[in-house]
Image: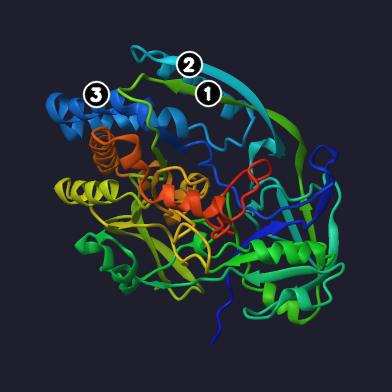
Amino acid sequence: MLQTPRNLVLARTWSWKDSSQNDKKFYDTDFISSTYGRRVAITNHIARRFLARVRRVYNDVCGIMNCGLEVKEIVNQICRPGLKLPGSPKHLKVVKYIIDQLWKIPGVSFSKTDFELANWQPVNNSIDHAAELTVDNKPVDVVGAIAYSRPTNGTAMSGQLMYLALGVNISTLDLKGKIIMRDYTNLPIPTSLFGSIAYSFSADATANPVYSRPFVTPPHADLLAASLGGAAGYISAFNVSREQLERHYSGHSELRAAAEKNATASISINAKVGRVKVPRAMATLPGRSNETVVIAIEHLGAREIESSPATDGAYGNVLNYTGRGESTLWSVGPVQQAIDGVVNITKSRELDNVVVSPGYPPASGPGMVPSLSSMGGLGTYYTNALLPTMALISGPWSLWAPSFGADALDYDRLGMQHIAIGDAVLMLSQYSKAELAGNYTVFREQRANGTAETITINYDEAQFITGAG
């Protein structure tokens, strides 16, 4: 029997024109979580001495356990205040904290500029308070609005509730004025595939036969199609309890039944929109030479959380810790010295649940470079700019389930992963600029003579990136 998903995210589908962007339409296609702002890009000439110092501290002075406590305090300072959308007071406070810490590093030079972003700020700085849903005038508990949904502020958008099964092409239907409901798609990736794409992976990386996380299948295409089709709103339904997805998603077991009866649903989104200035800080430590390698770091130190069927007779699944670390992808671009070095580092440091790979699948199409255009996150920008790049990222369930809080981090694991990054910076420092360019040099030549292309990324408009495309 098909069980009813219990968790809903609401979006008022919309498009708008901005004269500063040549009247190009924008759509609310991206989820945003309270973890925004924790992503870091490190270049070889910026961070070599600092990371070397960190490694010495961990190894020679305080030991992993005590330094884990120190790292915990830093993470608390950055993450504890709650939702920090770009340009919000809490976000600016965190930026100030980071800048203050950077100034304490001896020999650092520093610059700061501002840039503009489209701003979306929920009422009371709360995604759950920003969304309201009724079905036939009866309130339905919700926990989250999809960020950048068009605000209704004091009014509601109403329409016939329409459930669309997975596999139905949303763009072929008459959506005008309707409230669309769809289950959040899960796409399990067999971990047996690691052997065909990875340079190396730890023995425990295939302990689970499949890997499935929400980031693998974001409903971007559905949101775009719903907006273009004139839908009044969109509901994304997760099959996980509302309590665990507090402040991000919610659920209602009768919603699909209501859709079968052509019930009327109403969505309210309470938020402010506009433009906001966001600071860009650059801290530089002088290196030994002028070569540049990008190391993108996202969501490290996470504990593994898996979804499994509820055992108390309730509908849907529950989320539980497995006792392991979350799977980590360490992507390394086509630079053989870097590939060999990272493989050796992951083994010598005994990093758990890690896959060293040229990137994140699927493979690029014919005539495209690099062979894997995505590194899963920020590294995608740089590798497609054909800069020597490596990237570490995980996509744990806790990004979608803030109820786990700080407990979702293993601070000792986080510390060891950063030691390994320090090892990588020091390892790379022994090679020349030409050596570190690796096959990126060939790719640049192919792009210049028209025999190969990279994926197109609009750097001005894109505020977030989860992969290629």
What's the residue at 23%, 46% (across, down)? 341
Cβ–Cβ below 8 Å for labels 2 and 1?
yes
Horizontally, residue 8 falls left or right of residue 305, namely right
Q: Earlier in the sequence, mark 2 or mark 3?
A: 3
Cβ–Cβ below 8 Å for labels 3 and 1?
no
* Label 1 residue SS: strand
Name the quarter where the N terminus is drawn.
Answer: bottom right
| Residue 379 drawn at (x, y percent) | 46, 46
Q: Residues within 10 Å of mark 1 (few under 14, many from 20)?
A: some
Question: Which residue in the protein does label 1 denote?
Answer: 281
| Cα–Cα gap, marks 3 and 1 | 22 Å
| Cα–Cα gap, marks 2 and 1 | 7 Å
Question: Which residue in the protein does label 2 denote?
Answer: 110
Q: Amino acid at mark 2?
A: Phe
What's the residue at 43%, 52% (across, down)? 442
* Label 3 residue SS: helix
The disc label shown at residue 53, or none: 3
Q: Amino acid at mark 1?
A: Ala
